[in-house]
Amino acid sequence: MSAVFERPSLLQRLRPVFSGFDGPLTLAVLLLAAIGLVSMYSAGYDHGTRFVDHGRNMLIALAVLFVAAQVPPQKLQQLAVPLYVTGVVLLLAVEFFGITRKGATRWLNVGIVIQPSELLKIAMPLMLAWWFQKREGQLRVPDFLIAGLLLALPVGLVMKQPDLGTALLILAGGLYVIFFAGLSWRLVLPALALGGVGILAIVLAGPTICEPGVDWHVLRDYQKQRVCTLLDPTRDPLGKGFHIIQGMIAIGSGGITGKGFMNGTQTHLEFIPERTTDFIFAAFSEEFGLFGVLGLLAAFVFLIFRGLMIAGEAPTVFTRVLAGALSLSFFTYAFVNMGMVSGILPVVGVPLPFVSYGGTAMVTLGLALGMLMSVSRSRRLMQS
């Protein structure tokens, strides 16, 4: 008597691969990807192959997301230290062998040209999450101080390149991990209050401290100019203030309903600088207006809150603080980009996730979402 074996269909073989994927998180990603494609088609219409390249970058990011989602959190935890050490070593190599472009030394040639600081956007939260997992149940003040040193080293190296935008994102990702690990509000609130006082002092003293010849010591001249331009873009309306002024004009001219797809005059008459990268939010706002902006904000809020829900349900310290930090990192990306385009934050070169053009940043975002999906997927598979 012979047994009859029925060969499983392709769908049945693929089902275990896709099982456990977080539906709401996938929906949020696809929604933002669709908004990004529509925005890039209009903003990059006369920019050669920008739309095609953006679609290619998005497919690569989605592939990275899919692969990363298959890696269980235990494996991610094992990769934390090697990734962090590799990232720091590459940043040190940039100091000695880096490639300089437009006055900044941020790139390294290792057969291909890479920007090592992008690796730290992922390696930093991984490393700190690993550290706090190791210290679970015995956290003391020195443990937070060591975490601060682990964070300060790459942030300082990236600041030295100089790359304020990337340094800010690495710093934020690390601070989110430290906060979720249990940092007391008694330490957080005074730091926030001190930062608020500092910002208020800069705003009130703006006309004085922005005078030529005043040295800020801590910031480089171009960084000082960014802050001073934020305080008063009309100081140099055709130079350093041009980006902010044109961005605000585009956002305001969109009104409630926008000028319509492909009808943005500020965009297509090329008044908006970097309209496919850092300032694509201005182009989107002009064409889709307040309603479009509210829809974009709703998509980001949905993504962030879903990520925080995944963090809240995570079973270990590592997965909980990692998922929480990655979720709030998307908030940092979106808030800083929209803030600088709207004229409430200095221009620091931070992309709008899945909307702005850029290959390396897109892949980094896909990897972060894949890790978030991995945390959710592992929890779902454990429950099933």
Image (cartoon, rainbow, N blue to C red):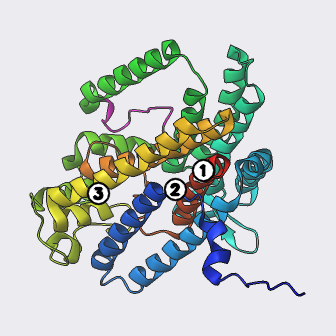
Q: Indicate which disc, 3 or 2, sits on the residue closer to the N terminus.
A: 2
Disc 3 target residue: 296
Q: Residue at x 46, y 55 (%)?
A: 25
User: Which residue is at the far top?
Assistant: 186
Q: Residue at x 18, y 65 (%)?
A: 288
Label 2: which secondary element = loop
Any magenta on residue 205? Answer: no
* Amino acid found under the numbered disc labelled 2: Asp
Of the residues tagged 1 and 3, which is closer to the observer? Answer: 1
Q: Residue at x 26, y 53 (%)?
A: 244
Question: Are there few (<14), some (14-19), or many (20+) residues within 10 Å of tag 2?
Answer: some
Q: Which range of residues does the magenta coloring cover?
A: 209-220
Q: Give the percent coordinates (x, y) of residue 183.
A: 57, 21
Q: Answer with the quarter of the image where residue 130 lies.
A: top right
Where the N terminus falls, by quadrant?
A: bottom right
CA gap between label 1 and label 3 equals 28 Å
Q: Residue at x 38, y 36 (%)?
A: 213
* Amino acid found under the numbered disc labelled 1: Arg
Q: Answer with the quarter of the image where residue 216 lies.
A: top left
User: Which residue is at the far right?
Assistant: 1
Disc 1 target residue: 380
CA gap between label 2 and label 1 equals 8 Å
CA gap between label 3 and label 2 equals 21 Å
Q: Determine whether label 1 and label 3 are within 8 Å by CB.
A: no
Q: Determine whether label 2 and label 1 are within 8 Å by CB.
A: yes
Q: Give the percent coordinates (x, y) of residue 250.
A: 17, 61
